Image (tube, coloured by chain):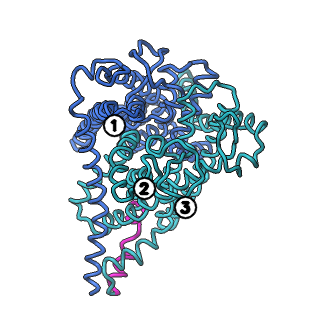
Amino acid sequence: MRTRRIEWLIEHALFLCAALSVLTTAGIIIVLSVETFEFLREVPLLEFLTGTEWTPLFANPRFGVMPLVAGTLLVSAIAMAVALPMGLLSAIYLSEYAPERVRRVVKPVLEVLAGVPTVVYGYFALLFVTPLLQRIFPQMSGFNALSPGIVMGIMILPLVSSLAEDAMRAVPRGLREGSYALGATQMQTALKVVVPAAFSGITAAFILAVSRAVGETMIVAIAAGQQPRLTASPFVPLETMTAYIVQVSLGDTPQGTLEYRTIFAVGMLLFLMTFGLNLVSTWLRERFREEYS
Amino acid sequence: MRHRADLVFKLVALSTLVFALVTLAALVFDVVADGAGRLDWQFLTSLASRRPEDAGIYHALAGSIWVIVLTGALAMPLGVAAAVYLEEYGTRSRWARFIEINIANLAAVPSIIYGLLGLGVFVRVMGMGRSVMAGACTLALLALPVVILSTREALRTVPSTIREGSYALGATKWQTIWHQVLPMAMPGILTGLILSLSRAIGETAPLITIGALTYIPFAPDGIWSPFTVLPIQIFNWVSRPQAAFKENAAAGILVLMALLLAMNAIAVFLRDRMQRQGRS
């Protein structure tokens, strides 16, 4: 009888630990909502979402988040232009061409690339890649979107590569053999059979990568500058949503003020964007699993 | 003709990997070239200073170690307990399924959002202030999804015959888990824990958000002490205009990378030992 009760207690204690993750999600949503609600009492939602000037720390503050969103999207787009094609190609190589020996060397190196702290990538972007790019584009400013975008793309490449490779390796061998039997080359098989068959898995990898790029902080805080600017030029300083949160956290803005609440409002927007992307990615991966199970 | 296209395509695909490797080499070379000259005993044992040539990394290194040890102490029991529940108890319940989806989603939430959570909950509501404890709690929440996922994988490698043998001898479920399953899975659990901590030690954004200071001229002396960590100190030095501080940043990166390398070496060592045990 006593052992029964102990067993019961242990099971429920373990359940509480597992439920902590639900509590974490709830905590994130509550903390962000409370402060965002306070913020929106003073700044109308429409002005926040559609305003094109972001100067909350100035004497005459304006709270239009568009410049931060545009900066985030520009840097993320550059990162994706690097990470998607390169990640997909390296995944095709690893899944369809690479001999086992090569895979065993390359995979750990890619893991190292993914494990480098982002502050190190920021250093690399600011002090190595930017000077290098300035030789090609002399008009480029010391802070810009291009250099952190490229470096972020390289950082995300291993994620895209390994998830896309997993998806391609899950494609049944019979499909490839059928393709070879019809006289297709390896490239034709890879591009016209394996990639389309793994399409939803690959798309899930891409979407997760976009989510990572949108939420990435230190590379842009170091190398993109801290000037909110509505621009499509990759050569001028700008500010992303994440970099803005860092900028305010570093300063001495007093707690409880409207300026201070802006970081929670921006954080809420960031959370909603990444959460939406993650849900789509999970859904696609589940669908992919159903196709081949 | 077709086969030439095939060869070109293969080379293009291969070149993306070469590019990634070359970038990694350039990064390492750049940091070593900038920072190796600055790295000496004085740098490792000195505190922050406004003069770059006097400044050192000791306070930040001590802060990083404080935070990471405490993070591990918090994340390991919670993560293992959650994983044991999901893997051994609740596999069929609807709640367990919901928790699983939730953990997968949490793993993809940007780290800076965890910083805002830590600021709202640990720093303010729970009144921990900008202390080592608040930082460790924040990083523990950040590390938990990874710890849970890797622990579950380690638990899955324990053969079910071990469990059945234990039940056959009259052990209860928890006795079986505590005396048979967990000891067998321990090397795998520790490997996952160390790898997730090595990611947490490089985290900058969430700790900046909860208010870890960028200039702090002393090492923490307890869990309620204010603190800074290596990545924040590096960020602080990179952001300064003087070239001499950039050298300090590079030297700081070398210290951080050495720490990461040491942690990964321990993880690889444990994984090796585990594989050898599995074979015998």
Residue A276 placed where, x, y %?
A: 61, 52
Q: Is residue B185 magenta?
A: no
Quadrant in the rendering for residue B127: top right
Which residue type does callout 3 highlight? Answer: Leu
Disc 1 chain ID = B
**SS state under label 1:** helix
Q: Would residue A285 be found to the left or right of residue B266 on screen?
A: right
Instruction: Tell me if label 2 and label 1 are in contact, CB under 8 Å.
Output: no
**Badge 1: residue crowd in 10 Å (few <14, some 14–19, many ≥20):** many
CA gap between label 3 and label 1 equals 30 Å
Residue B169 placed where, x, y %?
A: 39, 32
Instruction: Tell me if label 3 and label 2 are in contact, CB under 8 Å.
Output: no
Residue holding disc 2: A139
Q: Which chain is cyan?
A: A
Q: Would residue A40 be found to the left or right of residue A250 on screen?
A: right
Q: Would residue A156 be found to the left or right of residue B31 on screen?
A: right
- The structure residue drawn at horizontal position 25% and vertical position 82%, both measured from the top left corner, is B4
Residue A42 placed where, x, y %?
A: 77, 36
Which residue type does callout 1 highlight? Answer: Thr
Residue A284: mark: 3
Instruction: Tell me the mark number nearer the camera, choosing from 2 and 1.
Output: 2
Q: Is residue A116 above or below residue A199?
A: above
Colour in which chain B is drawn: blue
Q: Is residue B142 visible?
A: yes
Q: Quadrant of the N terminus of chain A?
A: top right
Residue holding disc 1: B191
Q: Is residue B256 visible?
A: no
Q: Which residues are magenta?
A: A166-182
CA gap between label 2 and label 1 equals 48 Å
Q: Is residue A170 magenta?
A: yes
* Magenta-drawn stretch, dominant element (helix, strand or loop): helix
